[in-house]
Image: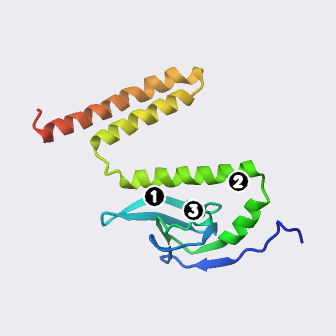
């Protein structure tokens, strides 16, 4: 048996089961072999769904690198079969990888933590919605081939401007600017 063929623990989790809780310590991640889960965080006594994950996706991965408490809870949306990836197993595999890859994994993980924390801390208001919509439009537009840009602009931009106008009208009506 090669050193890369470590047999990983499997775990069955029934629908409705809380797989991990925000704030708890963790030292493992889970690969979804079957089923689906909801990843959510409780912020200001509100449940904010961060993702729905299904077969082939991993959750709890931050615990493989950091000792920080879990930043989200995960609940099984249906019966799940999970493969448990422990910190020790991950570390063994990472230690055998190229030093550059190790450095990139740690750096990317830290960036994800920073972005997740910023997103959870953001209260969100209509101005944020407008700004985010503009950023997404600009990013999609910039990523398109030149042959598709005009079509995208002609079909999406008018609807985006209508959406932005509706938000402005709503803001004006409820802020007394009308």
Q: Looking at the image, is mark 3 or mark 1 nearer the viewer?
A: 3
Name the residue: 68% across, 51% down.
103
Q: Is residue 30 left or right of residue 133?
A: right
Q: Looking at the image, is mark 2 or mark 1 nearer the viewer?
A: 2
Name the residue: 65% across, 53% down.
105
- Asked if the residue at tag 1 contacts the one at tag 3, i.e. Cβ–Cβ closer than 8 Å, the answer is no
Secondary-structure class at tag 1: strand
Secondary-structure class at tag 3: helix
- Asked if the residue at tag 2 contacts the one at tag 3, i.e. Cβ–Cβ closer than 8 Å, the answer is no
Secondary-structure class at tag 2: helix
Name the residue: 76% across, 63% down.
93
Q: Which residue is mark 1?
A: 50
Q: Which numbered disc, 2 or 1, marks the residue that appears first in the sequence?
A: 1
Specify few, some or many for label 2: CA neighbours under 10 Å numbering under 14, 14-19, or 20 or more: some
Residue 47 position in % (x across, y down): 36, 64
The residue lying toward the viewer, choosing from 156 and 131, is 131
The quarter of the displayed image where residue 66 is located: bottom right
Q: Which residue is mark 2?
A: 102
The residue lying toward the viewer, choosing from 32 and 156, is 32
Residue 163 position in % (x across, y down): 31, 35
Q: Which numbered disc, 3 or 2, marks the residue that appears first in the sequence?
A: 3
The quarter of the displayed image where residue 117 is located: bottom left
Specify few, some or many for label 1: CA neighbours under 10 Å numbering under 14, 14-19, or 20 or more: some
């Amino acid at each position: 048996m090669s050193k890369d063929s470590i047999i990983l623990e499997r775990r069955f989790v029934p629908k409705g089961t809380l797989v991990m809780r925000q704030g708890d310590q963790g030292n493992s991640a889970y690969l979804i072999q079957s089923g689906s889960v909801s990843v959510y965080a409780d912020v200001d006594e509100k449940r904010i769904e961060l993702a729905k994950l299904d077969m082939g996706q991993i959750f709890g991965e931050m615990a493989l690198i950091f000792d920080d408490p879990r930043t989200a809870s995960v609940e099984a949306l249906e019966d799940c079969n999970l493969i448990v990836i422990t910190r020790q197993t991950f570390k063994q595999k990472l230690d055998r990888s190229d030093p550059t890859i190790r450095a990139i994994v740690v750096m990317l993980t830290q960036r994800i933590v920073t972005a997740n924390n910023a997103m959870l801390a953001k209260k969100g208001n209509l101005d944020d919605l407008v700004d985010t919509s503009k950023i997404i439009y600009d990013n999609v537009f910039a990523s398109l081939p030149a042959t598709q840009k005009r079509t995208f602009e002609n079909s999406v931009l008018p609807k985006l401007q209508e959406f932005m106008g509706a938000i402005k009208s709503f803001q004006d009506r409820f802020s007394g600017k009308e």
